[in-house]
């Protein structure tokens, strides 16, 4: 399933919030596909390479690191989730015909953990 909800807003930096969110997703998946393992295949947040600042300021490297940490801790502490994959390894260009600078600064999908 792909719920499409963004963890990139609100209480994204809270391990407790993420733990509850991932737990609820696991319960839903278990109801839909009993006995099947669940993988968290999109986790993390956007960060602009070289943009430093508060952990509460979206797009800073600190914010990206904290959200990623919260996702990892939350998923790895849930025995009902079999694994996690980051979204994504490296920043990639976007299709400017369908996305704008307000949502993808510098014309990139800035979710990469390696720049």
Image (cartoon, rainbow, N blue to C red):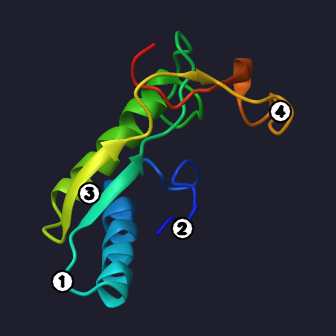
Q: CA distance from mark 4 to mark 1?
A: 41 Å
Single out the residue that lies furthest toward the top. Answer: 50
Q: CA distance from mark 1 to mark 2?
A: 20 Å
Between circles 4 and 1, the one closer to the viewer is 1
CB contact under 8 Å: marks 3 and 2:
no
- Quickly name the residue at label 2: 3
Residue 10 is situated, as x and y percent measured from the top left of the image, at 57, 55
**Near-viewer residue (62 or 109):** 109
Q: CA distance from mark 3 to mark 2?
A: 18 Å
In the displayed structure image, the side of residue 35 where residue 42 appears, left or right: right
Mark 4 crowdedness (10 Å alpha carbons): few <14, some 14-19, many ≥20: some
CB contact under 8 Å: marks 2 and 4:
no
- Quickly name the residue at label 4: 100
Provide the secondary structure element on which disc 3 rests. helix
* Residue 106 figure quarter: top right
Q: CA distance from mark 2 to mark 4?
A: 22 Å
- Rendered image: mark on residue 74: 3
Answer with mark 3 or mark 4, whichever residue precedes in sequence: 3
């Amino acid at each position: 399933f792909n719920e499409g909800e963004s963890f990139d807003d609100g209480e994204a930096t809270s391990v407790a919030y993420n733990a509850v969110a991932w737990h609820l997703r696991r319960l839903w998946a278990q109801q839909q596909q009993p006995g099947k393992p669940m993988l968290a295949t999109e986790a993390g947040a956007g960060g602009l390479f070289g943009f430093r600042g508060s952990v509460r300021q979206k797009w800073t490297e600190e914010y990206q690191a904290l959200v990623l940490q919260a996702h990892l801790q939350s998923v790895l502490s849930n025995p009902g989730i079999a694994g996690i994959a980051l979204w994504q390894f490296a920043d990639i260009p976007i299709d400017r015909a369908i996305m704008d600078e307000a949502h993808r600064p510098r014309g990139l999908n800035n979710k990469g953990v390696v720049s």
